[in-house]
């Protein structure tokens, strides 16, 4: 579960996602019943965040 990997709860993640969506003024996910997929804005945010994290995070030497 993603929440366990982040050492938090599902409800805490949901709240943060809602806060981010509110801040951006757009949904990050297209939600249908129990399914969710990235919205267009969600894909844009993921792309931007991926670029930030790969350029600023130190590479592991495993």
Image (cartoon, rainbow, N blue to C red):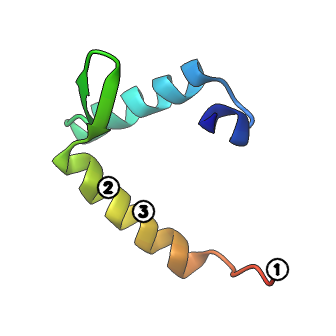
Residue 48 picture quarter = bottom left
Give the SS element for disc 3. helix
Disc sitting over residue 49 in the figure: 3
Disc sitting over residue 22 in the figure: none
Q: Residue furthest right?
A: 62
Q: Position of residue 10 (x, y in %)?
A: 58, 23
The answer to whether residue 43 is above or below residue 56 is above
For this rendering, which residue is in front, 60 or 21?
60
Looking at the rendered image, the disc whose residue lies closer to the viewer, 1 or 2, is 1
For this rendering, which residue is in front, 22 or 30?
30
Quadrant that contains the N terminus: top right
Residue labelled with disc 2: 45
Q: Position of residue 42 (x, y in %)?
A: 28, 47
Give the SS element for disc 1. loop
Separation of residues labelled 3 and 1 (CA atoms)? 23 Å
Residue labelled with disc 1: 62
Residue 12 visible: yes
Separation of residues labelled 3 and 2 (CA atoms)? 6 Å
Whether pointer 3 and pointer 2 mark residues with C-beta atoms closer than 8 Å, the reply is yes
The answer to whether residue 9 is above or below residue 61 is above
Q: Position of residue 45 (x, y in %)?
A: 32, 55
Residue 29 left/right relative to 14: left
Give the SS element for disc 2. helix
Quadrant that contains the C terminus: bottom right
Tag count: 3
Q: Residue at x 23, y 34 (%)?
A: 27
The answer to whether residue 53 is above or below residue 3 is below
Q: Residue at x 61, y 38 (%)?
A: 2
């Amino acid at each position: 579960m993603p929440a366990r990997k982040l050492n938090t709860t599902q409800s805490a993640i949901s709240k943060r996602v809602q806060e981010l969506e509110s801040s951006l003024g757009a949904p990050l996910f297209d939600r249908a019943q129990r399914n969710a997929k990235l919205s267009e804005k969600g894909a844009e945010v993921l792309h931007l965040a991926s670029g930030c994290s790969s350029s600023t995070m130190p590479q592991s030497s495993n």
